[in-house]
Amino acid sequence: METEPPVRHPDAPAPGTKLGQHYSRCFGCGDEQPGGLRLSATAGEGVSLVAEFEVTEAHEGAPGLAHGGLLACAFDEALGGANAMLRLPAVTGHLQTDFRRPVPVGTRLHITAQVDGVAGRKIYSSAAGRLNGPDGQLALHARALFVIVDVSHFTTHGNREQIAKLSWDQAARDEQLDFNP
Ligand SMILES: CCCCCCCCCC(=O)SCCNC(=O)CCNC(=O)[C@H](O)C(C)(C)COP(=O)(O)OP(=O)(O)OC[C@H]1O[C@@H](n2cnc3c(N)ncnc32)[C@H](O)[C@@H]1OP(=O)(O)O
């Protein structure tokens, strides 16, 4: 697949900027979602971000170990967040996760996510997850394809009332995402 290098949007949040939750009920980042991951993300260099979340008992699969599906969710969220550097609304088309090491409850999972290339509406991304910090043991690796969509994707298929409550302009002022409700 021929891709173009991703181009960081001139209005993308500066490296080091903490990205706010894009929707308070988002399972990945929202603070009003019981048992949610509450993943916090920071803009990285280029078209990338760094994200972290703490694995709790709410995220267990086997006793004391994270559920793989929830870990994949964290990667979906982090990889989706990297699209903020392009400032293009996009949804996950394909997500592939390699689970290399178990992730115990109490781990702070450190994720680096980046956009690798763009081909038309297709955004190709990858991410790595390490245990308890950027120098920790590699536990997961993921690749994803996001497809750029019009905002009408969300208003047509989603909850229009909830979407109307989102303050898109305020979000933009706060340098948060103004898409992917
Ligand atoms: C800080 C946080 C920031 C925000 C984080 C958000 C994280 C969460 C992100 C999500 O979880 S989004 C929710 C999960 N994803 C979805 O619900 C998407 C459901 N799927 C769809 O709505 C449609 O299938 C989709 C919009 C993805 C594509 O439909 P379209 O009719 O618009 O496009 P089309 O099917 O023509 O595909 C466009 C291109 O993408 C390709 N494509 C689409 N899906 C693909 C797929 N699954 N695998 C490979 N290629 C795929 C397709 O082949 C085509 O390639 P070409 O341009 O080369 O012809």
Image (cartoon, rainbow, N blue to C red):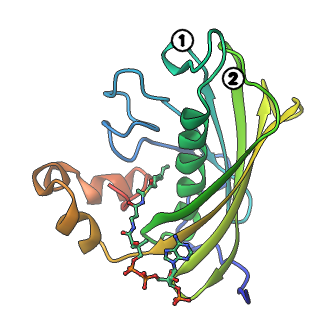
- Disc 1 beta carbon < 8 A from ligand 1? no
Horizontally, residue 38 falls left or right of residue 143, namely: left
How crowded pointer 1 is (Cα within 10 Å; few <14, some 14-19, many 20+) is rated as some
Q: Quadrant of residue 6?
A: bottom right
Picture coordinates of residue 114 (x, y %)? 70, 60
Q: Residue at x 89, y 33 (%)?
A: 135
Q: For the residue labelled by badge 1, is the local secondary structure a helix, a strand or a loop?
A: helix
The correct choice, above or below, for 132 with respect to 157 in the image is: above
- The tag earlier along the polypeptide, 1 or 2, is 1
From the top left corner, tell me how far across and down residue 134 is, in percent: 83, 35
Residue drawn at 16 percent across, 53 percent down: 159
Q: Nearer the viewer, residue 114 or 124?
A: 124
Left or right: 16 as drawn, with respect to 70 = right
- Location of mark 1 (residue): 57
Q: How many other residues sit within 10 Å of disc 2, few (<14), some (14-19) or many (≥20)?
A: some
Q: Which quadrant of the view contains residue 151? A: bottom left
Residue on which disc 2 sits: 108
Where residue 82 sits: x, y (%)? 60, 58
Q: What amino acid type should be assigned to the residue bearing mark 1?
A: Glu
Q: Nearer the viewer, residue 148 or 31?
A: 148
Q: Amino acid at mark 2?
A: Arg
**Residue for point 71% across, 86% down:** 3
